[in-house]
Image (cartoon, rainbow, N blue to C red):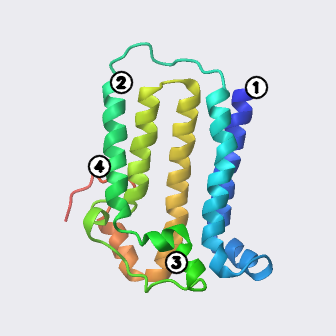
Amino acid sequence: MYLMLFTIALTAYFALHSILAARRIKGVIVKYLMPVRYYRLFYNLFSIFSMLPLAWWFLALDKTALLKSTWYLLPGILLILAGGLWILRAMRGYNLGEFSGLYQLRYGGQLHNVELITTGLNASVRHPLYFGTLQVFWGAFLLYPTDVSLIVAALSSAYLVIGSKLEERKLAQQFGGAYRSYQRKVPMLVPFRWGRKKN
């Protein structure tokens, strides 16, 4: 019962996270509730503080081990390290002030001129930050292979896939044909293609 409730709560968290990122919802909030300069910072703080009860719940839940061997420990550690390093490298492609919302807070919601970045890690995968996050979650599952960590890894993966597709709609509207060409050339989440020859 508690595991089912945790699954529902985590699903609701991811759904709300995606809803708040939608342009239409953002437009309503900045029109009626807060100036646009505060929105990104609010979004990040809300995401962090609403995750804390779920993190506590995750730690408190009784867990059932799914794997009895220890062969998976080293791959788990390596995946976490690889994902962490990938995330750190991917973050170099972001403006951290804009990513956190502090730049918008200071400059009234204005952003730098946004360009389509197709170099660096973005030449291998369209969402490098998400790919690194996938590695960390599944590495954590291999390190602690329980029913609860499997649910977290699976739901997080589903959220990243759905979130990527929603984000790509906005990017296609923003960059038009340039982004659609980029989509045809570069994989979305995992920097590999199966069953397709590279032109």
Q: Image quadrant of residue 166?
A: bottom right
Local packing at callout 4 (Cα closer than 10 Å; few below 14, some 14-19, many 20+) is few
Lower sequence index among marks 2 and 4: 2
Lower sequence index among marks 3 and 1: 1
Instruction: Give residue 1's mark.
Output: 1
User: Which residue in the protein does label 2 denote?
Assistant: 73
Question: Which circle, 4 or 1, is nearer the viewer?
Answer: 1
Lower sequence index among marks 3 and 2: 2
Lower sequence index among marks 4 and 3: 3
Q: What x and y, as percent, mark residue 189?
A: 39, 55
From where the camera sits, is residue 43 visible? yes
User: Which residue in the protein does label 3 denote?
Assistant: 103
Residue type of the residue flagged with mark 3: Tyr
Give the SS element for disc 1: loop
In space, the residues marked 4 and 3 are separated at their CA atoms by 40 Å
Q: What x and y, as percent, mark residue 135?
A: 39, 43
